[in-house]
Image (spheres, rainbow, N blue to C red):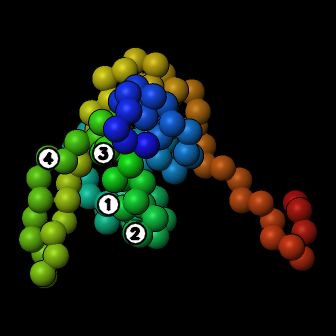
Amino acid sequence: MGGGDKANDLFTALGHPLRRRILRKMIAQRSEISPLELATSLDEPLSALSYHVRVLAECGAIRLVRMKQIRGSTQHFYRPAIKAQWARTALRTTKGRPKKKPSRGEEKD
């Protein structure tokens, strides 16, 4: 992604289920939120979540609103910035967390 049309980048970004979950959480929160707070509330590893937040920021789906120094590192805070109506509609109509596939040796329910 990046370097191209932001609408195409946004379309591609919304193809990932975790990015949709991040955006839904941010829209529901209605206030700024950090990747650390998102990782905790979505029960996802911070490293993976931070990567997806960067992708969303690069395509203009979210925007950085402030930074805060905390114990030698910088915490970033974001807000949703989606203006495209088709993207907001997609977030409303594609709910839920994808089901985990059973690994080898595990039985299906």
Q: Which residue is mark 4?
A: 65
Dot 2 crowding, Cα within 10 Å, few <14, some 14–19, many 20+: some
The mark lying in front, picked from 3 and 2, is 3
* Residue 57: numbered disc: 3
Dot 1 crowding, Cα within 10 Å, few <14, some 14–19, many 20+: many
Horizontal side of 76 relative to 35 (left or right) equals left
Q: CA distance from mark 2 to mark 4?
A: 19 Å
Residue at the spot 89% in from the left edge and 62% down from the top edge: 108
Q: CA distance from mark 1 to mark 4?
A: 13 Å
Q: Which residue is mark 2?
A: 46
Earlier in the chain: of badge 3 and badge 2, it is: 2
Q: CA distance from mark 3 to mark 1?
A: 12 Å
- Element at label 4: strand
Horizontal side of 35 relative to 48 (left or right) equals left
Q: Is residue 54 above or below residue 108?
A: above
Cβ atoms under marks 3 and 1 closer than 8 Å = no
Q: Which residue is mark 1?
A: 35
* Residue 30 shows in this picture: yes
Residue at the spot 10% in from the left edge and 64% down from the top edge: 68
Quarter occupied by residue 70 = bottom left
